[in-house]
Structures are given as structure tokens and as C-alpha cells.
Image: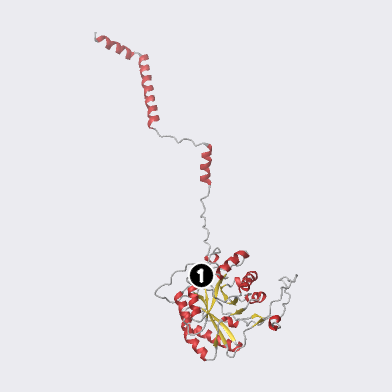
Amino acid sequence: MTDQPKGLFKTAISDPAVRLAALGGALGGAVLVLAVVLIVGGPKKAPTPPPAAQESQVAKIDAPPPQHVRQPVPTLPSRAEPVTGSTPLPVPADPAPLPAAPAPAMEAYPDLPVARVEPAPTGPAPTVDQNKTKPEAPSAPPPDMVGPPPADKPMIAIVIDDMGVDQRRSARAMKLPAKVTLSFLPYSRDLKAQAAEARKLGHEIMLHVAMEPESPEADPGPNVLLTGVPEQELLTNLRWNLGQMDGYAGINNHMGSRFTRDLAGMRTVMAELKERGLFFLDSVTSRDSVGAKTAKEAGVAYATRDVFIDHKDDEAFVRKQLERLEAKARKHGSAIAIGHPRDITLRALKTWLPKVQAAGFELVGASRLLHRPAPSPTHLSGTSG
């Protein structure tokens, strides 16, 4: 019984048809196994992105690398927005101990030769514009101005501006041994208290109003008077400055080599000074300042400085400038000097002020040396009884 199956198996193997069928089955199985391996464990092909995604990818590849975007430059303090409040802006506390004084925060003042300003002639001549084709309509005649009254002694006014920010040196300026004029920056801390102390010690008080300098690198401080702005913005800043303290009789310009050349801007300033009864001292930081011209037009009392005494931080230079001041006062009967609360200046003035008085000069406030509108004939005649 057991031999029979063997015989059948042999017979099947020897049959060519059977062998061919078996070989075909083996090959089919191998193909099936290979297909399963490829499907389950083989590398996966990334899906094809939709057309929109393809376009986006192409754009990213072809686009140039992004360029560096320059950040906007912060607005300089000199062009601060108008401040309508009356509280002075905070100023950093004074350093302690007292260091050597840096150069004053002002423009590089040239040693300008300043012509003496004479009273205006009666009636201006019509002016002609640059192309000389269309005469400018004559403006209203400026009021006649009279200079300071004659005095027995040559008169000298010493104006110390940039007062109030450096409180220690400002306090030293208040203690100078003779009458001087102290001009305070409107954004000084404790401004009203400092000004009250200066008045108590017998000094004349002024306001030192920041005006636009020529150099954009110079920082005149907040609420500066700028050229090229709407008149209302200019007035807002001007009135903020004028409202920071009281008890002063006039102003002078802090920096301002650009603004004091601007006819429209200076006319706006003079109209406001006229309304408030304030005088204008032109620091003359530009040869082309129209300060005197616009003051005459508006009928504002004014003066111009004669000498800067300390635009070089050098003791010998300061002494030389004080000698020039004396010479000008002797020649013209009066002279105005501007200095700053700096160590060298304060030391020089402390010894010079008593000496110049002993030499026969009279030290006066800046308001004594103004060109003022001439009294009207009606005022001179008085009233009949």
C-alpha cells in the first residue's frame, strides 16, 4: 500500500506538463512576494502638489533674497511735538561730585563782527525781489526807535544764558558779586524757584527760548521754534516756552542760526512779544539774522549782543573777550556780552566784575540798553487841563 503513492509521485514528476505547471506556480509566488515587499517597505514617492502650491514653490525659488529694511530714524528731540501743558519737562539730576564743565550745549558761535544798530530811519525804501522784475509792496513804516539814554559812565550788560539746567553752576552765577542778567532755559527743572532766587539776589531775569539751529546735529531741546511749520504749531511752541515762568522782561534766542534768518517765523515771534510787552535780545548766531528788522517792524524793544565771551573754553580767551567788551563800551557808550554758566567763565567774572566797576564802568541789566519805540507826539504833548 505504501509503494503506490511513491509511484504516483514519480510518475507526476516525470511528466513534463506537471513540471512546467509547478515551475510556473513557483515563479508566480516569487513575483507576489516581491510586490508585497515593495509596497510595504519600499521608498515612498512624495505626493504631487496641487497647481497653486507648485506656483508658490516656484516663486520662492526664483525670487531674490529679501533686502534689509532700514528702520525709520527716531524723531530728534529738537522737533518734539508741541506740548500744551505748563509743567516743565523733567531734567536729569546734576552729577555729583561736580565734574569739569563740558562745552556749552550751543552752536559753534563764530566770532561775528556785529555792527551797532542805529535807530531806524523814517519810512523804509521799497525793496525789490531777487530777479528785480517786480517791486515788493512797501510795508507799514516801522516805528522810530531810540537807543539807550546817554550815561555818565560807559554801560556794560553781562548776560549769562543757558541758565537753569545745570543747577549748581547756575547757583554760582546767581552769587556773582555784581548785577548781571540771567536768561533761563524754559525746560529747566524747578524753573520758577530758581528764577525767584535770582531776582531776590538782584539780577535781571530773561527767558532763553530755543530756536532752530542750522546744523541738524545740534540739539536745542524740546519745543524748539522751527522754520517751515504751520503758524499755529509755531505759536503753540512759542506760547509753551513763554508760559513756563513769569517775572521776566524779555527773551533771547538759544541757538537759532536757522530760525532767526526766517522772516515769516520771526515776524510771528515779534507779534507775540509785542502783545505781551516783552523785549528781544538777538544773540546774533547768524550774520543774516532778521531779529532787529522784525523787531523794528513790530515796534518791539530790542538789543543785539556785541561780544561772546566764552565760545572757546579757554581762560586766556575769556580774558581777551572781556577786554574787547570794555573797548566797545568805551567807544559806543554801552555794550552787551553773552556768556554761559561754565567754570572758566564764572571764575573770570568773579574777579573781573569788581575791577571793571572800579575802572569807571556801570554794570546794568540788558533792559537798560534797548532800542525802544519813540514816544508818539501825542504822548509827548500830554493832556491839556
State the residue at coordinates (52%, 39%). Answer: 54
Image coordinates of residue 144 in percent, x first then y, are: 68, 80
Is there any visible trace of residue 303 in the rendered image?
A: yes
Looking at the image, the residue that sits furthest to the left is 2
Frontmost residue, 90 versus 62: 90
In the image, is residue 247 above or below residue 66? below
Q: How is the image coloured?
A: secondary structure
Frontmost residue, 266 versus 376: 376
Where is mark 1, residue-wise?
Answer: 187
Task: Tell me: 291 left or right of 175.
Answer: right
Looking at the image, the residue that sits furthest to the top is 1
Crowding at dot 1, Cα within 10 Å, few <14 / some 14-19 / many 20+, comes out as: many
In the image, is residue 143 above or below residue 80? below
- Identify the image quadrant of the C terminus: bottom right
Is there any visible trace of residue 121 in the rendered image?
A: no
Mark 1: amino acid: Tyr
Image coordinates of residue 257 in percent, x first then y, are: 58, 73
State the residue at coordinates (34%, 13%). Answer: 15
Image coordinates of residue 370 in percent, x first then y, are: 61, 81
State the residue at coordinates (53%, 46%). Answer: 62
Q: How many marks?
A: 1
Q: In terms of secondary structure, where does tag 1 sit?
A: loop
Image coordinates of residue 186 in percent, x first then y, are: 52, 71
The quarter holding residue 80 reads bottom right
- Identify the image quadrant of the N terminus: top left
Task: Tell me: 36 left or right of 75.
Answer: left
